[in-house]
Image (cartoon, grey):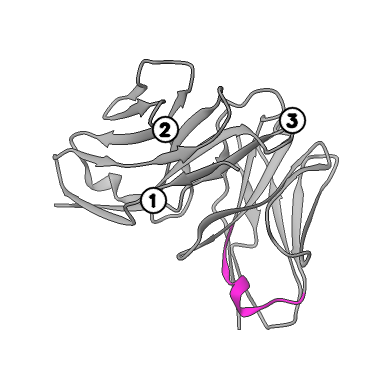
Amino acid sequence: AQTVTQSQPEMSVQEAETVTLSCTYDTSESNYYLFWYKQPPSRQMILVIRQEAYKQQNATENRFSVNFQKAAKSFSLKISDSQLGDTAMYFCAFIGRSSGGSNYKLTFGKGTLLTVNP
Amino acid sequence: KAGVTQTPRYLIKTRGQQVTLSCSPISGHRSVSWYQQTPGQGLQFLFEYFSETQRNKGNFPGRFSGRQFSNSRSEMNVSTLELGDSALYLCASSTYGTAMNTEAFFGQGTRLTVV
């Protein structure tokens, strides 16, 4: 079974500083994608960044970047120059083939609540 | 283009009742997934529908069911409501039928409170 673990239920950071959110996952698949989703207090979940397992280069989207360590099955999110609008719940997610099946299944971690303080 | 629309936004039901939630995906998206979000358990996968067929199912009791219509709109139904069913129910649409690198687009959710 595919599992995603986020070991930090809550984190806080000062505005303009850098913060790293951790995520580990478990799978027997060789090809898959990893995502970080953000859920602001307004509740609508939005995609922050994605990473393909076959790509060694870490994905970057403006102030957001990942540290993807495939062998360690680790996928952390780094937010640089944190802004007040970054305050949200962040979910790490994995997509691969569902167990024993041919369909894709998206699995989420339990989330990390990030608070950016002024 | 229009996003994922979930209705209603809020619901209050009594134990033992049943409830139906609706989700209209982004036009052209044939995959609709449902998740239950609670503070303790995070996001738990309920089921996924693709072209009117249930492709994946999470570990929820049979009281939770769903369906998808020919226009890709989906409904989920919870019968014999329990207090523990109180949660935010999120719907996501995507094109997972063709590629797994596609983004899942979420609705704003339906907040269900069971009293």
Any mark on residue B107, and which?
none
* Location of mark 2 (residue): A73
Instruction: Please report whichever mark, 1 or 2, sits nearer to the chain's N-terminal start.
Output: 1
In this rendering, do the residues under marks 1 and 3 share a single chain?
A: yes
- What amino acid is at disc 1? Pro
Disc on the earlier residue, 2 or 3: 2
> Callout 2: few (<14), some (14-19), or many (20+) C-alpha neighbours within 10 Å?
some
Q: Secondary structure at mark 1?
A: loop
Q: Is residue A21 positioned above or below B12 on the image? A: above
The residue depicted at 57 percent of the width and 37 percent of the height is B104
**Magenta stretch?**
B80-89
Q: Position of residue B48 (x, y in %)?
A: 71, 45
Q: Position of residue A70 (x, y in %)?
A: 41, 25
Query: What chain letter is assigned to the residue under label 2?
Result: A
Q: Which residue is mark 3?
A: A102
How far apart are the alpha carbons under marks 2 and 3? 22 Å
Residue at 55%, 26% (x, y): give it: A32
Chain for disc number 1: A
Q: Is residue B55 above or below residue B89?
A: above
Quarter-of-image position of residue A76 = top left
Residue at the spot 68% in from the left edge and 57% down from the top edge: B59
- Of badges 2 and 3, the one in the foreground is 2
